[in-house]
Structures are given as structure tokens and as C-alpha cells.
Amino acid sequence: MIIATVGTGGIGGYLSVKLIKAGYKVVNIARGRHLDAIQKNGLRLIKSNVTETVTPWMSTDIPENVGKVDFVIFGVKGDSLHEAANLCSHLVHSDSVIIPFLNGVEASDRLLEFFPEKNVANGLAQVSTTIIEPGVIEQTGDFANFIFAERDSSSSIRINTLRKAMITAGLNAPDTDDIDRDIWEKFVMFSALSGVTTAARVTIGQIVKSPNLKELFINVMKETAAVGRAYKINLHESLELKIWERLSKLPANVRASTAIDLEKGLPLEIEWVSGAVKRLAEKVNLDAPLNSTIYTLLLPYKYGAK
């Protein structure tokens, strides 16, 4: 079994280290200084001052040199998905499985522009990681969940094969009976976490202490959830409050990756978060004024400091 991680950033890099240490063949598709560092020094994962270093089976920026693989994991930013998918068509054979672990709810559908539907699955990652320097991934939280299934939510032999590999590697990869629900639940949470911590330049701890920010946070979630329900997604009626209960107990310094990207002057994937809520709401004749406002406030920073 050969697994390719496309992008090999925070999510792909984390998975690569864990799977390689468990003995699996992993190909890292990366580029630039990140790729150079992986090829020279290996791929490193740091958590709580403990460093794990692995050497991928192959690391390259030319996917056609790899040949066919069994699993393709996309962990790129939303704006990079089309470019990455277009470059990686050479990796896929008739039974390959392609799993997107991207923010937002549209990645699986977007991949259908490039690959047959039989090859495309759906998934979400719940892990807090970041590239702190080329070739080095840092895990900043204790949680690491990877939920995936076929697009119809079924758990096929090939999905179970990858799930068993992840569990063997010490990862949490639970089964699911509704992948669309799971992805939208994360999207409801992330639309608020990303939108409020980035637009207001605050942490979750500051939001907890501010009645106004707390109200905004919960209302952004309610707005996103209303859009999901309009698309017939089976979201629990008290989902927003349950998410807030959980998030309010997180370490006070927690903020979204989008907020970190803004601070670093990096491009923001707002088109696939607040922008997506605005766009999806319009398609079902709903208003999403809070997400629309957040999108507008962050739009000047969409392409980063440049």
C-alpha cells in the first residue's frame, strides 16, 4: 500500500510522520524550501519538545515521477486545491481513493472536476498543527481525529484499509454514518473560530471574557448552521451551544489557523470559510450577514501581505 500526501503541510506532514513510523510507504508531494528540507533532513514532527523524524519513501514536486498510489490525501489550502489536483492526476489508478482533509464543505465536490466520482471520498481532519520552519511540523494541541468515508457515507473495504492503517499508527480514525453531517459540524465551528479570531484579532480566551464577542461567535455559528440545514444536512438543533461549551473550555490562547496566517502575512482561505457561507446561503435564498461582513473585512488580506 502506497499513500501520497499532497501539500505535506500541517495535516499531510503530521499524517506522514505517524504513518511512516508505523511502517507504511508514504510519498510526500511538496515544493520549494519545504521539499528541500524534507529531502535533506527528513520530515520532523515536534510536540511538547519531543521530536520525531522520518524519511519518506519518496519526496518530490513532480507527481508523474511517482507512479500510481493507493491513497491520495489532500491537505492543501482551499485556494490551492485546483492546482494540486490538476498536477496529481498521474497518481491515480482505477481503485485509488482520494481523500480531502481541507477546511470548508466543498472540497470533495470540487475534486470531481478532476477525478472520476468512484475515486473521490470525503473527510475532515481535527488536528492543530503548523509548519514552523521548512521540513518541520509542530503539533500545538492534544487532539488528532481523522474522519472519512465514501461520498455516500458508506465504509468500504478501501476506506477501512486506510482507517486500520491510521489506527495502527496510533491515530484516532473513528467510523461515521454521516460524513456530510460531520463535515458541516466542523464547518459550523470553524466559520466562527476562523471568522471571529481573525477579524477581531483575538483568542478564544478573549472571546470567552467578552459578552459581545461571545454573542457574535454563537450567532455566526447559528447563521452557518442555518445554511447547512437549508441543504438538508442533519445538524442537531442544539449543535451551536454544544460547540460553544466545548470551545469555551479550550486553552485561552487558542485561535484559528486563519488568524495565524493573517499575522504572518500569508494568504487567507476566506473564500472557503466565511465566503463559502455567503455563497452557499445565496444559492438557497438565505441571508448570512455576519459571515458576509467577516468576509468583507478580511477580503483586503486575501492574498497576504504582498
Image (cartoon, helix red, strand yellow):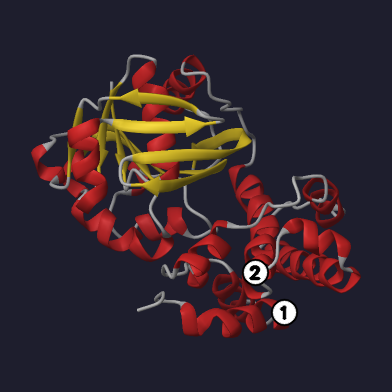
Q: Residue at x 36, y 32 (%)?
A: 44
> Which of the pair 42/153 is nearer the observer?
42
* Whole-percent x, y for residue 171 in the image: 53, 24
101 over 290 or under it: above or below: above
Q: Say which of marks 2 and 1 sits in front.
A: 2
Say which element carries label 1: helix
**Relative to 207, is 292 above or below?**
below
Measured as percent of width and height from the top left, residue 282 is found at 61, 81
Mark 2: which amino acid? Answer: Gly
The image quarter in which residue 53 lies = top left
- Seen from the viewer's position, the closer of residues 54 and 159 is 54
Asked whether disc 2 touches disc 1, contact meaning CB atoms under 8 Å apart, the reply is yes
In the figure, residue 38 lies in which quadrant? Answer: top left
**N-terminal label among 2 and 1:** 2
The residue at the point 42 percent across, 32 percent down is: 45
Viewer can see residue 254:
yes
Q: Is residue 278 left or right of residue 268?
A: right
The number of numbered badges drawn on the structure is 2
In the rendered view, does 54 fall on the left or right side of 233?
Answer: left
Residue hosting label 1 = 290
Q: Residue furthest right?
A: 211
From the top left corner, tell me how far across and down residue 160 is, in percent. Answer: 47, 23
Q: Is residue 255 above or below residue 268?
A: above
Identify residue for label 2: 195
| Mark 2 → mark 1, Cα distance in angstroms | 9 Å
Instruction: Say which of 303 and 201 sits in front.
Output: 201
SS class of the residue under badge 2? helix
Residue farthest to the front, as pictured: 49
Q: Which mark is residue 268?
A: none
**Residue 10 in picture, x, y percent from top left:** 44, 44
Direction from residue 80 to residue 65 in the image, left or right:
left
